Image (tube, rainbow, N blue to C red):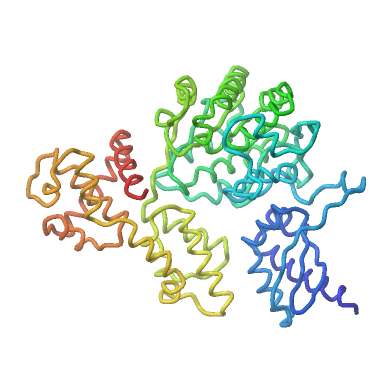
Amino acid sequence: MSVQASLDQQWARVSGRLKDEVGETAYRSWLKPLTVEDFIGGQVRIVVPTRFMRDWIRTHYADRIRALWTGENPGVQSVEIVVAPPRTDAAALGSPTGGSRLNAAPRGAANASVDFGSAAEGGADRFPSHEAPGAAAAYSGAPEAPPLPVFIGGNGLGEERDDVSALLDPRFTFENFVVGKPNELAFAAARRVADANAVTFNPLFLYGGVGLGKTHLMHAIAWHIRKKDPARRVIYLSAEKFMYQFIRALRYKDTMAFKEQFRSVDVLMIDDVQFISGKDSTQEEFFHTFNALVDQNRQVIISADKSPSDLEGMEERLRSRLGWGLVADIHPTTYELRLGILQSKGEQMRVQIPLKVLEFLAHKITSNVRELEGALNRIVAHAELVGRAITLESSQEVLHDLLRASNRRVTIEEIQKKVAEHYNIRLADMSSARRARAVARPRQVAMYLSKQLTSRSLPEIGRKFGDRDHTTVMHAVRKVEELCATDPTFSEDVELLRRMLEG
């Protein structure tokens, strides 16, 4: 048997196990297009069709591929993922790149694609953040404009789709979204929009801090609509990509095609709309696109890091339009929600993780869900690569840098000072015996934030607030949670304080 035939057989077994682990959808989107090129000096070289696919596989699957392949062949020391050299023959130009355009993409690289790789977020060839047709021209050497991509409907079976929609992450579905008090309104609104045959509220505006689930819900809506009614035309992309397409249309004097493309869809989904703040020309075009779609009773779904009224650098008329429909915020996670997310993630990874490790992570990492899941991924990867069981001690060792950064993120003293300034009370009132509501409520907020943003125990927090008992701190936490659930203004106050402290 030839070396290549043996490699192909090994890869068949490895990819079969990967398919069982990640599921049919993710396998078809990311792993099926891979081909084995050679095995030299203990290194297996695997070829992928695009740079974007290479980066995604390196981040999410490379370690697991190497671990499985080493089990098949102990001689394998490393796995290299490389991009296939470009082909210029007619067959290559007409062939699919392997995987659907509306399939999977990580946050932050959601807009990378074969056609627009230079606009990928964070890439070396990233387009300029300002708006100027001349600046756009510096990033394009083509004398004539290639035709704008046209949306093509599909049946969701992995066929090639030639459109500007960002890739969708197959993990980001409604079924994989863990619901709790902080996000239940946003989740319910997203489900309603995805299930509805007619437009119920327009637009749906989702907002919240970094890593709290906005993009997950956006992807889930797109997946659900695609599954429910594949004929509906959906475009999902970031505001930055929308701006890039607009600059491109100006550059090539092709604005009519741009308008037709974005105003003929059934559902337009724009992620991170705050990125067009201060971009007057893009805002103007987005405003008219928004109005055209709403007038035609087409669904518009927007996400941002702030509510419409708080978006700085945005035209007043646009802020007003964005607040027309339903505005649903996603609050910072609670301990219970973080624990539920970790348990769900562990089940998806099919890894047995001790409960005390999950509880430890839920207590220690409170900033956002993305950081929480990243910590869990590190723990699991370390256990698989070095062959050690997952324990609380090993988890603390693996995450020492993350935990150290988390512990120094904010102190109780800083929280007390910031809350006192916000509510215009004396810092000494945080430790005083005064019980007037004007003092007691800010003190409760400071206790609540101390519990959420620091690793201090309840008795330690109580001592910082005038030697109060830990039950007083527990009461304060419960009271603030109840008020956040029933009083939107109070909830926004607490959220603003959290963001200021974490920033």
Residue at image point 80% right, 74% down = 39
| Residue 281, percent from left and from top | 58, 24
- Indicate the quadrant where residue 404 lies: bottom left
Give left or right: position of 407 versus 435.
right
The correct choice, above or below, for 407 with respect to 384 in the image is above
Which residue is situated farthest in the top direction here? 295
Q: Nearer the viewer, residue 280 or 149?
A: 280
Which residue is situated farthest in the left direction here? 433
Give left or right: position of 96 versus 433.
right
Residue at image point 31% right, 39% down = 491
Q: Nearer the viewer, residue 230 or 488?
A: 488
The correct choice, above or below, for 184 with respect to 193 in the image is below
Which residue is situated farthest in the bottom direction here? 74
| Residue 210, percent from left and from top | 46, 46
The correct choice, above or below, for 37 with respect to 415 in the image is below
| Residue 279, percent from left and from top | 54, 29
Residue at image point 79% right, 76% down = 40
Q: Nearer the viewer, residue 465 or 17?
A: 465
Give left or right: position of 12 versus 393.
right
- Indicate the quadrant where residue 405 lies: bottom left
Quadrant in which the N terminus is drawn: bottom right
Q: How many marks?
A: 0
